[in-house]
Image (tube, rainbow, N blue to C red):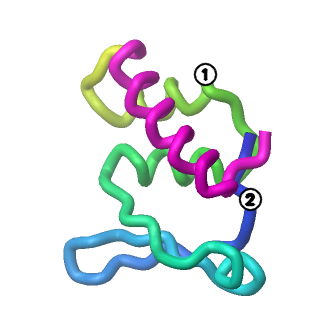
């Protein structure tokens, strides 16, 4: 799985946002605010990856169990699916 579309990630003061560009900006109206965990997930999704690889990236970056990480990851992925921003 990987991200569908073109985005630039920018830090504005204390916030990090994924901003759609090009054709993606035409079909996705808005920005995605990224917290620390979703930034790791987002970075993983910039290339073709698997759920288990994302879980590993999150558990390596934070003190969290694989089960807790997977629940957070799944919620984020579900939101990307609803917005049609995920290729699987």
The quarter of the rendered structure image containing the N terminus is top right
Q: Is residue 75 above or below residue 83?
A: above
Give me the disc on residue 4: 2
> What residue do we see at 31% from left, 55% from top?
35
- Residue holding disc 1: 52
Residue 54 drawn in magenta: no
From the viewer's perspective, is 63 left or right of 74? left
Magenta part of the protein: which range? 66-88
Mark pair 2, 1: CA separation = 19 Å
Q: Residue furthest left?
A: 14
Secondary structure beneath dot 1 equals helix
Q: Is residue 35 above or below residue 76?
A: below
> What residue do we see at 71% from left, 37% from top?
49
Give me the disc on residue 86: none
Disc nearer the start of the sequence (2/1): 2
The quarter of the rendered structure image containing the C terminus is top right
Residue 79 drawn in magenta: yes
Q: Main secondary structure of the magenta part?
A: helix
> What residue do we see at 69% from left, 30% from top?
50
60 or 83, nearer to the observer = 83
């Amino acid at each position: 799985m990987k991200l569908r579309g073109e985005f630039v990630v920018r830090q504005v003061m204390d916030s990090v946002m994924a901003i759609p560009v090009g054709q993606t900006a035409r079909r996705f109206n808005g920005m995605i605010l990224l917290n620390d965990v979703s930034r790791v997930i987002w970075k993983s999704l910039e290339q073709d990856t698997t759920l288990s690889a994302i879980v590993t990236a999150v558990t390596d970056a934070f003190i969290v169990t694989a089960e807790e990480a997977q629940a957070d990851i799944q919620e984020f992925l579900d939101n990307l699916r609803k917005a049609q921003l995920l290729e699987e």
